[in-house]
Amino acid sequence: MSGTLDMDALIDDPDTRVIVCCGSGGVGKTTTAAAIAVRAAERGRAAVVLTIDPARRLAQALGLAELGNSPRQVEVAGFEPKGSLSAMMLDMRRTFDDMVLAHAGPKRAEEVLANPFYRTISSSFSGTQEYMAMEKLGQLAAEGSWDLIVVDTPPSRSALDFLDAPQRLSTALDGRMIKLLTGPARAGGWGLRKVVSAGFGLFAKAVSTIVGGQMLADASAFVQAFDGMFGGFRERALKTYELLRSSGTAFVVVAAPEPDALREASYFVERLAEEQMPLAGLVVNRTHPVLSGLPAAKALGAADNLEARGGAPLAAAVLRLHADRVALAQRERRLVTRFTKAHPAVALAHVPAMASDVHDLGGLREIGDRLAAE
Ligand SMILES: Nc1ncnc2c1ncn2[C@@H]1O[C@H](COP(=O)(O)OP(=O)(O)O)[C@@H](O)[C@H]1O
Ligand SMILES: [Mg+2]
């Protein structure tokens, strides 16, 4: 049966250079990534955490209130790690801009950045955020200032999007996209002109000609300026992809003890195996363990008894609550068992649901303790 995820062994191992926290939306990826980074720093590593979408209060707790697209040392009262911790929040837009700057000459970069087509596509491609997270990871790794990079992944519907993004974006950015982009523009331009010549006034005709012409000009300027950068993009994506496959990388899949999240985790685990990407284990986050061994049936029986005698309504309510918790815990255990049966080699860690959201150092430490417990 499945073993236990030894989180401390993972973060203490100097050969662990990258930890990627992935999983479907809302399961606790950002929280887990931050908790791992805090723990790693306190255990002596020079860690950096790349967060994608931290909740506002968590961002504030890490000193990320101001947007910046590069890591900053976390300086919080009461936080004196043996190692060090830097944190950053991904600014997708600026990462894309930086990438253009790095690949085009200054003059061409300026043209691309100012181009309305670029401004639209750089924020509206599906997968752009995933791709930019990858790109940033590549940059942080190349910078070499940290010995452990902990990566949060975007809130995609599917955890797989992160792995598919480089391929998808490089396909989108090559000739096919250009055809798509220029195609509708041209069609729109011609279409407009046709409509106009079919009977609108001269004024409208002049306006539409300018608009249509401008669209065409933007599109072709964009194509020209972008041309020649694709190779560089693809090369970088490939390099980051290799980093993800290297033995210094560990994927931590996060899931809630719920059918959808665990199904998604299953797919992801299988996909990692296919891609030969190193999986550290599965974190089942926000579980509801029961503290007392009193079986549900006994608790319900006792509640019935109390109520039949017309006394102690509060005690009866507590007993019923306990019975609900037992049922929930059993359901969660069943779901996790279903997962481990399908993936017996995957190591597990369980993190209970905390009484409130996790948005400060204390909360992150507690999550870290739970991650490393057992
Ligand atoms: N074990 C936990 N106990 C209580 N709250 C949690 C726990 N894990 C995460 N949360 C809270 O759940 C919310 C979503 O977590 P988050 O890490 O942002 O998820 P994701 O990044 O996967 O979308 C946050 O408000 C976070 O504080
Ligand atoms: Mg998140």
Image (cartoon, rainbow, N blue to C red):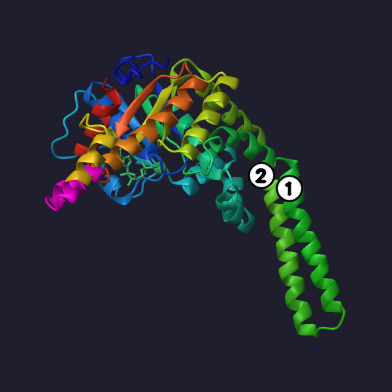
CB under 8 Å between callouts 1 and 2? yes
- Residue type beneath disc 2: Phe
Please check the rendered image and state whether residue 108 is part of the magenta-colored stretch, yes or no: no
Q: Is residue 298 above or below residue 148?
A: below
Quarter of the picture containing the N terminus is top left
- Which label sits on residue 22? none
Question: Upstream in the sequence, badge 1 or badge 2?
Answer: 1
Tell me the crowding category of disc 2: few under 14, some 14 to 19, or many 20 or more residues within 10 angstroms, Cα based. Answer: many
- Residue type beneath disc 1: Ile
Q: Tell me where the magenta segment starts and ends, as one range.
A: 306-321
Residue beneath the point at 47% across and 17% down = 344
Residue 253 visible, this angle:
no
Instruction: From the top left corner, tell me how far across and down residue 117 is, in percent.
Output: 64, 55
- Which label sits on residue 178? 1
Q: Is residue 46 above or below residue 77?
A: above
Q: Main secondary structure of the magenta part?
A: helix
